[in-house]
């Protein structure tokens, strides 16, 4: 495992960037193919794509910088904030940033917010499964020491200096669970009963699977662990509550609408 995919003279292309970009593209492609089944044009997903990418990258980077300000950025040159080629993106920050960007776009275009959220949700899980492999190649988000047959070992020359002893391949765990989540959401999509159902289930499913994988993580500084929970587990509690709340709210709204129509 090595972070560099291609190096031609001064040009260096990292696996992290390649796989994250591929995850974005595959996720958007998947959503565009699903959109017509929800009565939305696939072109709307394509138009939304740049907004999602910009919101996700900005949100993910700001979240990372805020989380590791003292350790990495307080004494570093200001431009280090923008140097993402070695990693340094937090998915939950990207989810928040992409959600805000999508809301602005959909309000301006007068498109149905929760229906589009349902269209996007399976693609988010699929894209995440691909992008997480970039973390594996990069050497970030690694796991605790592991003696199991599938443990991974990073090379000593990795610039991020992950452990060189066998560790849990937490990135692979995360990727496989996200693939399973994608499969479940894709099945639910065609049977959904109200707009917002699939996105709410995504929030719940991701919060649960991410919290499980975090139990095997080994890269957090001790001061980031609070009440025995990693930062991602702490935020997952809020995402889980948001998902449950959204599911109940949208179901109640759907029942009221159907009741009004019946009367």
Image: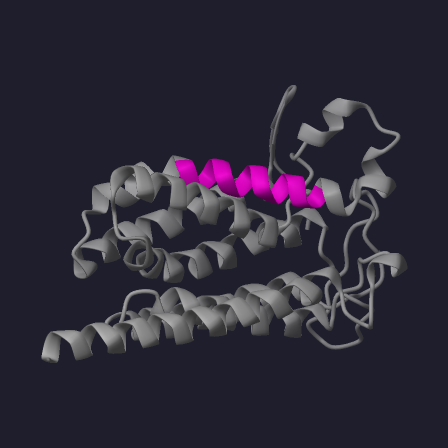
Which segment did they paint magenta? Answer: 51-64
Evaluate whether residue 2 shows in this view.
Answer: no
Q: Is residue 55 magenta?
A: yes
Q: Residue at x 73, y 40 (%)?
A: 65
Residue 234 located left or right of residue 117: right
Which residue is located at x 80 percent, y 67 percent? 144
Q: Is residue 14 left or right of residue 33?
A: right
* Nearer to the camera, 247 or 116: 247
State the predominant SS element of the stretch in magenta.
Answer: helix
Instruction: Judge whether 82 appears above or below 104 on screen.
Output: above
Percent coordinates x, y for residue 48 in the rendering: 34, 40
- Image height check: is 65 above or below 146? above
- Answer left or right for 156 relative to 191: right
The image quarter containing residue 185 is bottom left
| Left or right, residue 260 beside residue 189 | left
Residue 98 in the image: state x and y as whole percent. Answer: 48, 46
């Amino acid at each position: 495992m090595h972070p560099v995919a291609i190096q031609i003279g001064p040009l260096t292309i990292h696996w992290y960037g390649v796989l994250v970009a591929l995850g974005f593209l595959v996720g958007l492609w998947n959503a565009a193919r699903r959109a017509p089944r929800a009565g939305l044009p696939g072109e709307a997903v394509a138009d939304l794509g740049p907004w999602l990418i910009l919101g996700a990258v900005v949100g993910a980077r700001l979240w990372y910088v805020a989380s590791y300000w003292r350790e990495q950025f307080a004494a570093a040159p200001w431009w280090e904030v923008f140097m993402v080629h070695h990693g340094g993106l937090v998915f939950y920050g990207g989810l928040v940033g992409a959600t805000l960007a999508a809301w602005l776009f959909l309000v301006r275009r007068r498109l149905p917010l929760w229906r589009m959220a349902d269209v996007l949700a399976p693609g988010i899980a699929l894209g995440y499964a691909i992008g997480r492999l970039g973390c594996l190649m990069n050497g970030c988000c690694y796991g605790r020491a592991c003696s199991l047959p599938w443990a991974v070992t990073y090379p000593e020359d990795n610039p991020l200096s992950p452990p060189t002893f066998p560790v849990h391949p937490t990135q692979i765990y995360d990727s496989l669970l996200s693939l399973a989540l994608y499969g479940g959401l894709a099945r639910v999509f065609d049977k959904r009963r109200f707009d917002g159902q699939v996105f709410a289930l995504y929030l719940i499913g991701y919060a649960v699977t991410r919290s499980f994988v975090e139990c095997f993580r080994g890269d957090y500084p001790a001061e980031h662990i609070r009440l025995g929970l990693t930062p991602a587990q702490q935020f997952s509690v809020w995402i889980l509550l948001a998902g449950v709340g959204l599911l109940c709210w949208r179901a109640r709204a759907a029942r009221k609408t159907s009741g009004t129509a019946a009367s």
